[in-house]
Image: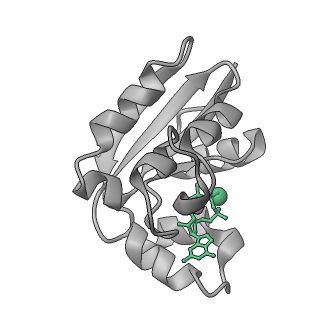
């Protein structure tokens, strides 16, 4: 089975949506949350995590937003969980995301799209080393 990194972004924490989102993930057959904590991310961690976006116009506001308050960081394990959490989340732009998805149900603003989930097994392993070192 697979592992993925999930971050419930500062907007999800501020709006009191973490329980709802965790519940959607937890209810999927076979999936397990194997690590979970609340933490405030520093710029260095976010530079590593979002390095692929450095230099893009949305990068600086993204880092400012992601460090603006606590996030909930999780490891989720299970069958096809990398693709599966991305499907639960919906597309990056919440307005393009279907109702029934997390972003489609709760989001409006592209930056404040509630949840991060690794986009491939390779990304998951890279990101898990950043957020949960020593958990391989
Ligand atoms: P993450 O799971 O957070 O990585 O989202 P994603 O994989 O759906 O999107 P991507 O990695 O391409 O972008 C990372 C984050 O940057 C997104 O979740 C958005 O919050 C933000 N972002 C991406 N593209 C744009 C954009 O065109 N405009 C703005 N304002 N923000 C963007
Ligand atoms: Mg991404």
Q: Residue furthest top?
A: 30
Of all residues, the one furthest to the front in this rendering is: 99
Viewer-nearest residue: 41 or 60: 60
Above or below, comparing residue 86 to residue 107 in the picture: above
Of the pair 75 and 12, the residue shown nearer to us? 12
Q: Where does the image place residue 23, in percent across and percent down from the top left?
A: 37, 27
Residue 34 is at least partly visible in this image: no
The residue at the point 77 percent across, 44 percent down is 122
Please state if 69 lies on the left or on the right of 103 as rendered: left
Residue 78 quadrant: top right
**Residue in the picture at 52% in, 68% down:** 110
Q: Residue at x 44, y 64 (%)?
A: 108
Give the quarter the ligand 1 occupies: bottom right
The structure residue drawn at horizontal position 24% and vertical position 54%, both measured from the top left corner, is 15
Indicate the quadrant containing the C terminus: top left, top right, bottom left or bottom right.
top right
Say if 7 sits above or below 33 in the image: below
Residue 46 point in image, percent of width and height = 51, 67
* Residue 29 shown left or right of residue 66 in the figure: right
Q: Is residue 135 visible?
A: yes
Q: In the rendered image of this protein, does residue 112 appear above or below residue 24?
A: below
| Quadrant, the N terminus | top right
């Amino acid at each position: 089975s697979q592992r993925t990194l999930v971050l419930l972004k500062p907007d999800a924490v501020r709006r009191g949506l973490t329980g709802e989102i965790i519940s959607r993930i937890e209810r999927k057959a076979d999936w397990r949350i194997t690590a979970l904590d609340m933490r405030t991310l520093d710029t260095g961690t976010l530079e590593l995590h979002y390095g692929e976006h450095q230099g893009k116009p949305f990068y600086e506001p993204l880092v400012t937003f992601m460090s603006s308050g606590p996030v909930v960081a999780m490891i989720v394990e299970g069958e096809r969980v990398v693709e599966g959490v991305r499907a639960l989340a919906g597309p990056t732009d919440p307005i393009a995301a279907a109702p029934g998805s997390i972003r489609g149900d709760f989001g409006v603003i592209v930056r404040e799209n509630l949840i991060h989930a690794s986009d491939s097994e390779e990304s998951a392993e890279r990101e898990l080393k950043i957020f949960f070192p020593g958990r391989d």
